């Protein structure tokens, strides 16, 4: 049985909180955040690569949509899917227990670096052709997070 992602993030955040405190003391807050962002980014890319490998094919956005059940498990996210196809995926997160959890842990200031930062980076590992855009997040104080993904269709050689 796999550990739910929200529980995995809680464990990681507990460790990274101490890491952030030590790094802040030694190299300053800005470099501490930058270092943690880079580590989290690398982890997210590797996570995306593992999902791609398990899928065994070049993933499209419907495959990506199928992965969302891992992030929404245990009611971690409440999402409203607006559009879904192989080439486009749009949804809003209207409740984020990740943001709630980081706030309870005293990590509201780091939440976007520990969680939101992963979203686009996961795509880099899953399928680097996916274009990701988000204009607002609950973590930063908005009412919802807007997720927009596009996977440009590759032109086929005709001839």
Image (cartoon, helix red, strand yellow):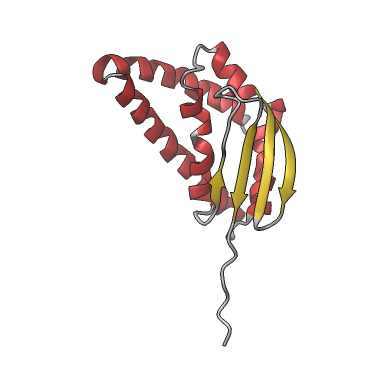
Please provide percent x and percent y for residue 141.
58, 22
Q: Residue at x 62, y 40 (%)?
A: 147
The answer to which quarter of the image holds residue 94 is top right
Q: Is residue 29 above or below residue 89?
A: above
Q: Is residue 135 above or below residue 62?
A: above
Q: Residue at x 66, y 25 (%)?
A: 143
Q: Nearer the viewer, residue 61 or 50?
A: 61
Q: Residue at x 38, y 35 (%)?
A: 38
Q: Residue at x 74, y 44 (%)?
A: 82
Q: Is residue 105 above or below residue 59?
A: above
The answer to which quarter of the image holds residue 27 is top left
Q: Extreme bottom residue here? A: 159
Please provide percent x and percent y for residue 62.
68, 53
The answer to whether residue 2 of the structure is visible from this angle is yes
Left or right: 153 with respect to 12? Answer: right
Please provide percent x and percent y for residue 36.
38, 28
The answer to whether residue 1 of the structure is visible from this angle is no
Please provide percent x and percent y for residue 122.
52, 43
The answer to which quarter of the image holds residue 69 is top right
């Amino acid at each position: 049985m796999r550990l739910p992602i929200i529980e995995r993030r809680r464990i990681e955040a507990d460790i990274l909180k101490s890491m952030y405190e030590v790094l802040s003391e030694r190299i300053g807050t800005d470099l501490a955040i930058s270092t943690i962002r880079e580590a989290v980014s690398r982890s997210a890319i590797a996570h995306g690569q593992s999902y791609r490998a398990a899928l065994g094919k070049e993933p499209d956005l419907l495959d990506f949509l199928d992965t969302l059940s891992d992030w929404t498990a245990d009611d971690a996210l409440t999402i409203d899917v607006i559009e879904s196809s192989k080439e486009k995926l749009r949804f809003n997160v209207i409740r984020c227990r990740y943001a709630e959890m980081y706030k309870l842990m005293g990590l509201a200031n780091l939440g976007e670096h520990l969680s939101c930062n992963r979203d686009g980076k996961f795509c880099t590992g899953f399928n680097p052709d996916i274009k990701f855009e988000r204009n607002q997040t609950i973590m930063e104080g908005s009412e919802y997070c807007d997720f927009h993904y596009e996977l440009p269709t590759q032109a086929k050689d005709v001839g």
